[in-house]
Image (cartoon, rainbow, N blue to C red):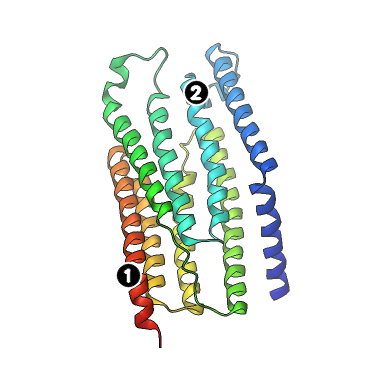
Amino acid sequence: MYSFFTRCGTWFDHFERHWESSEGQKVMATTLVLFFLVAVGIIELNRRGILPPPFDHVFSRTHLAAIEQAFTLLLALEVVSLILSLVHSVSRSVGKQFEILSLILLRGTFKKISHFSEPLVWEQIESVIVPIVVSAVSALFIFVILGFFYRLQKPHPLKMRGGDKSKFILAKKLIALTLLASFFCLGIYDLWGYLAYGQPEKIFEMFYTLLIFSDVLIVLISLRYSSQYLVAFRNSGFAVATVLIRLALLAPATVGALLGLGTAVFALGITIAYNMFVPILCETCSP
């Protein structure tokens, strides 16, 4: 059984190496460009009444919807990078979560106006201008907070033996592989619901629910190899941040944007407190 787990870890390394390579990044960028152009073309065909039923009712007739759809694909690719980051660092994965949240907020500005007819008129967007502005400004502030968050990160590795460290990393790789498979299945389910029934996209909300369980699981597994209070508190706090992000995605647009911004401040506060007190706590815990 352990050899199978080790083989899974090797598969993870192979996938990550290709995904994070420069060639992999170029393929993803090209895919986004082609997807956007195809989406614009399909929308134009639908506007001219060329698409046959039932696709004429599934696809939008507003070109701005193509931007929203391109952002959705970009978010899906970023989620894969987030899953890969779980193996390396808790703080890095939390940072990726806020990167995705900021992109979701920016996408929301296009999503709000993608349902209106063209050309846009003020009377159409007047009712949604406040949520649009709040989401855009919140995304900007989260971007700024992330800059400080990444700058304040310091290497504080868990104190564990070499063998235990390898087992802990392998456990995180197995969790990441499970998340990857789950996200792929959620994507297929969500796409089918959209094409067949016109259901709204909920893949990211569902994924963040899974992410909550994976974060808590990683925290509990880490306690098996290290019971340092400061590490347990920081990682548990970051898991709470994941819960708050999930609630932000569930809430109405304005409330969700403000909640997401507050969660970013909360994560930054945990990092500042951890960096301030980790030397003192380490001295207290030392023999």
Q: Residues within 10 Å of mark 2 (few under 14, many from 20)?
A: many
Q: Quadrant of the N terminus?
A: bottom right
Percent x, y for residue 160? 53, 78
The residue shown at (45%, 59%) is: 91
Can residue 54 be seen in this snapshot?
no
Q: Is residue 105 above or below residue 156?
A: above
Q: Secondary structure at mark 2?
A: loop
Q: CA distance from mark 2 to mark 1?
A: 53 Å
Nearest the camera: 217 or 164? 164
Secondary structure category for the residue under label 1: helix
Q: Is residue 102 above or below residue 182?
A: above
Q: Residue at x 54, y 19 (%)?
A: 43
At x 40%, y 61%, the residue is 239
Q: Is residue 96 visible?
A: yes
| In this rendering, the label closer to the viewer, 2 or 1 | 1
Q: Which mark is residue 60?
A: 2
* In this view, 222 is above or below 148: below
